[in-house]
Amino acid sequence: MRCFSYRVAHLISLCFVCVYLFINYGSAGKMKIVEEPNTFGLNNPFVAQGSRLQPKVTPAPVSGPVHLHQLAGKCFSLTESTYKYEFCPFHNVTQHEQTFRWNAYSGILGIWQEWEMANNTFTSMWMRDGDTCGNRNRETKVILVCSTRSKLAQVSEPSTCVYSLTFETPLVCHPHSLLVYPTLKEELQKEWDEAEQARYEGLITEQGYNNLLKDIFEDAGLLKSRKVKVKVQEAAADSARQNSLEKCKADYQKLREETERLRALLTQHNIPFTSETNDAKGTVSVTVKDQHLRGDNGLIDVQ
């Protein structure tokens, strides 16, 4: 009896398999092949995340308050709805769609670049140059908030492709924990003091003061340096100056040759003149004693 029941169950299983094969392949006559897109496998747990995400730039060096440097190398995650967000301080921010869709999204929302500062205080971290979003790159502003433990608390998208993260940590609870001035080297602190004094005495404008601060912060590695662009502009200006100098030299040579030609012409026609050299300017002035040419103008020799 037990053997008979086993055979019946086996036959029923075979029938189900036959019906499944007929429905999927029998009516079409051949197997349907679906081409997978390039994003396939982004959420595959057996594929390392590093190999799934392709950053456009490398993260900037770790900077800012020294007590925050211990966060480097750590990651904090938050799942909202069907998305998992991961914040890795001084590295990047990523987003992973938690669905079984064949083209589920995983991407980079920003890579560590620079601090945002105001009134001698670090206010937030900027993660820029993330994945392409229309005609721009995704970027994320990370706001640091005091809490009893470190965690990623909130994620929002205030504007298209620009995200806002709230990161809570006890490392910023001290009232002086986010001051900018103490993080600078002594020479940069001195430059800041001089800029402060110049603004107080009215020697520079507010805009000039802010530009000086920006240079100081760039030298400290707190802001992404824009000096590369300045160097390019300076190189272009130097090239223009060089071209102008070469042109001046060429024009001077032509003028000198013309002066020599005129002197020879005056000498040929016995027209008296005196030449004076200006040592300061290196120029030669020619004075014709008799302005009236006798008879012929001297350009054609009729003899």
Image: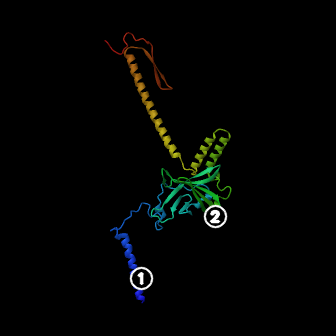
**Viewer-proximal residue among 301 and 156:** 156
Q: How is the image coloured?
A: rainbow
Marks 2,1: beta carbons within 8 A = no
Q: Amino acid at mark 1?
A: Ala
Numbered label attached to residue 9: 1
Q: Which residue ends up furthest to the top in the rendered image?
A: 295
Numbered label attached to residue 149: 2
Expressed as whole percent of the image width and height from the top left, the position of residue 268 reads 37, 16
Q: Which residue ends up furthest to the bottom in the rendered image?
A: 1
Image quarter (top left, top right, bottom left or bottom right) of the N terminus = bottom left
Q: What residue appears at the point 52 percent right and 59 percent down from the top-left corner?
A: 94
Q: Is residue 50 above or below residue 240?
A: below
Secondary element at tag 1: helix
Expressed as whole percent of the image width and height from the top left, the position of residue 246 reads 44, 33
Q: What residue appears at the point 61 percent right and 41 percent down from the top-left corner?
A: 207
Task: Tell whether 177 sits left or right of 107.
Answer: right
Task: Tell whether 125 sits left or right of 252.
Answer: right
Expressed as whole percent of the image width and height from the top left, the position of residue 180 reads 63, 52
Dot 2: few (<14), some (14–19), or many (≥20) neighbours within 10 Å?
A: few
Task: Tell whether 27 sits left or right of 192.
Answer: left
**Viewer-proximal residue among 302 and 112:** 112
Mark 2 against mark 1, which lies toward the viewer? 1
